[in-house]
Image (spheres, rainbow, N blue to C red):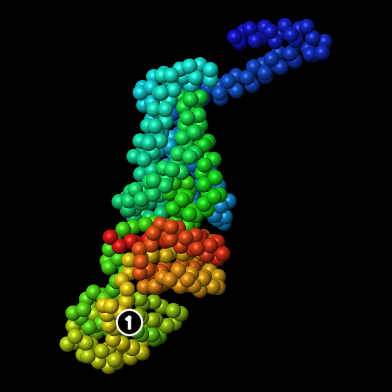
């Protein structure tokens, strides 16, 4: 074929030698054209000769670029989270490229040996091939109704848990979330992927199945991010969506284990609140803890921190009733602790019938560039949602790389009724509005439902 091409080209140029120039120039033109065509042909054959490597490469690049697009365009981050991007690229490399290729090509190729020849047929011949059509539907069924529910979604949720858990993934929680969202995820999956997979398996050669799926997945990820933003219930926990700065997780467990204090459940003890503030000095915590221990008491919840040149303390102490007066006297009369200006007050548990038991608990975590009004906005939204605050803490962090001040809010709050999914969706959208208004980097909501 190469020799024929050269002969035809030489014959054509010899007939127009006056316009073509000297034989030397004609030879250079021939060689250049041949090299260009040869390189193009070599590139075209890479997917055919190396389908596995090509599929992995396309899936890795696609997943990484989709996450970069979401971070830079949708979330508008000033700095790319490369650790998160690496996690998604790894998921694209290992699962989308490796596992899906193994399923779509070798496994389906053996289960349906005529799949490749069916894809190569014309539409007219496909219409006549009943067995090929049945095989096509069977492949789509196995992919959409077996592969995705049993493999893809569990793998995706586990990967998401690894990314968002801060190094302590809870895979049982990830799989539980996967189970809760399965119906909704599958409906969203099938709307896009059933027709896309039909086209893919009906017309693409075996080597082109993974690249075709990668293109569809990239488009879907962009559409999903644009439609849902950071909505985790409908967004990033679904098909290939990227984890945005807003997340919500649903966990079923006893609220008493998380949102109650020993004041409520340990009624055999007396309970004392100890608060103190004084000039910062080495040994304050050691001295105070020693006095409490000597008084036969036990420190449960506490917060101690330095604020400028002042050291502040707030703690709950559980003590046997017969020792409570002695403990308070020891705290107030201790000369070494006098500069702390210790104050004590009795705590009592909530009385049965005087309050409504909490059935839903929420842990809200917000992070954003420091600016006035951040806590006020979050607290106002919590109040508007009729949520009762159990615990709230704030702190300021400095990003060492950029010097940017980040304000962090952690709030535990409860509701006296079991919130259904529609209510949770509305609550999440409300907090997402706060996120956008104050430009929070992260708004993470953990929902704990009574068993």
Q: Position of residue 297 (x, y in %)?
A: 21, 81
Which quarter of the rendering shows the N terminus? top right
Q: What SS does tag 1 mark?
A: helix
Please report the residue visible at 22 percent of the width from the left and 83 percent of the height from the top.
270
Q: Position of residue 15 (x, y in %)?
A: 78, 6
Q: Which residue is mark 1?
A: 284
Does residue 21 lie above or below 378 as drawn?
above
* In front of the other: 92 or 80: 92
Please report the residue visible at 55 percent of the width from the left and 23 percent of the height from the top.
44
User: Can residue 444 be seen from the camera position used here?
Assistant: no
Does residue 72 lie above or below 91 as drawn?
below
* Image side of residue 56 versus residue 299, left or right: right
Q: Position of residue 127 (x, y in %)?
A: 49, 19
Q: Quadrant of residue 269?
A: bottom left
* Image side of residue 147 versus residue 190, left or right: left
Residue found at the very far right of the displayed protein: 18
Does residue 314 lie above or below 102 as drawn?
below
* In front of the other: 155 or 350: 350
Which quarter of the rendering shows the C terminus? bottom left
Please report the residue visible at 36 percent of the width from the left and 81 percent of the height from the top.
313
Tell me if mark 1 has few (under 14), some (14-19) or many (20+) residues whose alpha carbon lies within 10 angstroms of its own. many
* Image side of residue 348 versus residue 199, left or right: left
User: Can residue 176 be seen from the camera position used here?
Assistant: yes
* Image side of residue 186 versus residue 70, left or right: left
* In front of the other: 131 or 96: 131
Q: Position of residue 169 (x, y in %)?
A: 34, 53
């Amino acid at each position: 074929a190469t020799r024929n091409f050269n002969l035809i080209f030489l014959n054509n140029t010899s007939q127009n030698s006056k316009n073509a120039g000297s034989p030397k120039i004609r030879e250079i033109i021939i060689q250049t054209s041949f090299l260009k065509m040869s390189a193009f042909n070599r590139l075209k054959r890479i997917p055919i000769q190396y389908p596995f490597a090509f599929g992995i490469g396309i899936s890795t690049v696609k997943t990484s670029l989709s996450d970069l697009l979401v971070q830079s365009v949708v979330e508008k981050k000033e700095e790319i989270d490369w650790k998160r991007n690496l996690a998604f690229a790894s998921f694209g490399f290992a699962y989308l490229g490796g596992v899906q290729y193994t399923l779509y090509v070798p496994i389906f190729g053996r289960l349906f040996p005529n799949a490749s020849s069916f894809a190569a047929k014309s539409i007219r011949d496909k219409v006549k091939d009943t067995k090929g059509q049945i095989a096509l539907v069977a492949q789509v069924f196995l992919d959409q109704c077996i592969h995705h529910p049993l493999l893809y979604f569990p793998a995706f949720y586990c990967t998401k848990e690894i990314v968002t858990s801060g190094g302590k993934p809870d895979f049982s929680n990830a799989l539980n979330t996967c189970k809760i969202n399965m119906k909704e995820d599958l409906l969203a999956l099938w709307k896009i992927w059933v027709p896309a997979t039909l086209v893919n398996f009906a017309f693409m050669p075996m080597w082109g199945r993974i690249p075709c799926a990668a293109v569809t997945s990239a488009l879907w990820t962009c559409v999903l991010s644009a439609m849902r933003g950071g909505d985790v219930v409908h967004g990033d926990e679904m098909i290939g969506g990227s984890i945005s700065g807003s997340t919500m997780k649903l966990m079923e467990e006893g609220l008493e284990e998380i949102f109650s204090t020993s004041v409520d459940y340990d009624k055999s003890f007396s309970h004392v609140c100890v608060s103190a503030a004084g000039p910062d000095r080495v040994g304050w915590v050691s001295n105070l803890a020693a006095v409490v221990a000597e008084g036969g008491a036990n420190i449960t919840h506490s917060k101690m921190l330095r604020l400028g040149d002042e050291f502040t303390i707030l703690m709950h102490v559980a003590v046997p009733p017969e020792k409570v007066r002695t403990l308070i006297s020891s705290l107030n009369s201790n000369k070494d602790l006098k500069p702390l200006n210790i104050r004590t007050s009795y705590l009592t548990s909530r009385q049965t019938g005087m309050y409504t038991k909490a059935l839903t608990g929420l842990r809200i975590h917000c992070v954003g560039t420091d600016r006035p009004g951040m806590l006020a906005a979050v607290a106002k939204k919590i109040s508007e949602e009729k949520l009762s605050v159990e615990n709230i803490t704030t702190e300021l962090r400095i990003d060492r790389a950029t010097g940017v001040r980040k304000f962090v809010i952690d709030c535990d709050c409860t509701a006296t009724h079991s919130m259904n999914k529609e209510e949770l969706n509305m609550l999440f959208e409300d907090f997402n509005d706060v996120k956008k208004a104050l430009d929070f980097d992260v708004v993470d909501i953990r929902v704990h439902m009574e068993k």
